[in-house]
Image (cartoon, grey):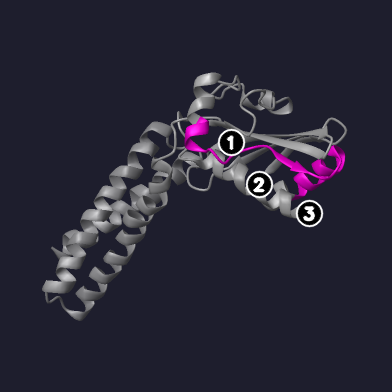
Amino acid sequence: MAGWAVWLAVSGAVLVVVGPVLHRVGVLPLGPALLAVPLGILLSLVALLLAVIVLVGGRPTPAGRGLVLGAAVASALTGLLPVILALPGLRAPAIHDITTDTSTPPQFDAIVALRVDAPNSLEYGGADIATMQREGYPDLETLVVGLPPEQLVERAREVATDMGWEIVADDGPAGRLEASDTTFWFGFTDDIVVRARAVTSGTEVDVRSVSRVGMGDLGANARRIQTFLERLAAASS
């Protein structure tokens, strides 16, 4: 049982870690990479169970106990941790296009040419998508700050850069900023456009974030927009 725990822990870790890495470098297609992760998580959870049984009820040698303990730690990291991180996103609506303005979503310009091969379109899905977003993210809304649009775009660029986004284009007079953000695990690229429009009380800021691939996003786009708006509000106060 100790040997199985170690072997399964190694196998699970390889699938969970190496699968996404091979996809990021272009060696492994997306489908097999996505399949590798849940399979690796399952193997890791089985390994964790076996390791706990051995550590609690077995009597391995000191060297063997060290291997089993290492297997338990590794399988917890590659089995339990991804599940814990993914759980909040499983409740998110199965959409990949999120915006603070569902009536007139901000439109992309410079990024359009970068998405010619992307499976997901930049055409907004309309009322059905808007309804799903409002149900899933009722607190996501337009931000109003007391700065002129051109100055707001400057602040937006600073915040976006601090968040690790790649700035694609920014136009202060037009009140527009476009950027891309790459996810950590699989290296998925999501595109963002920030729109700043003058209103009586200052500037109305709307943000749209769209994934290039995937039916859903596990809540990533909404979290990105919310974090950006919170930081922008703090930087503009």
Numbered label tally? 3
The residue drawn where x is 55% and y is 45% is 223
Q: Is residue 76 left or right of residue 140?
A: left
Q: Is residue 106 left or right of residue 85?
A: right
Secondary structure, mark 2, is helix
Asked which quadrant contains residue 179, the reply is top right
Of circles 2 and 3, the one toward us is: 3
Asked which quadrant contains residue 7, the reply is bottom left
Q: CA distance from mark 3 to mark 1?
A: 28 Å
Q: Three-letter amino acid code at disc 1?
A: Asp
Mark sitting on residue 190: 1
Mark sitting on residue 237: 3
The residue drawn where x is 59% and y is 44% is 224
Of circles 1 and 2, the one toward us is: 2
Number of other residues with Cα within 10 Å of mark 3, as a class: few under 14, some 14 to 19, many 20 or more: few
Q: Three-letter amino acid code at disc 3?
A: Ser
Secondary structure, mark 1, is strand
Circle 3/circle 1 CB separation < 8 Å: no
Circle 2/circle 3 CB separation < 8 Å: no
Number of other residues with Cα within 10 Å of mark 2, as a class: few under 14, some 14 to 19, many 20 or more: some
Which residue was labeled with disc 2? 228
Relative height, residue 175 to residue 163 (above, below): above
Residue 187 in sight here: no
Report x, y in % for residue 214.
47, 30
Q: Nearer the viewer, residue 172 or 66?
A: 172
Stretch in magenta: 133-158
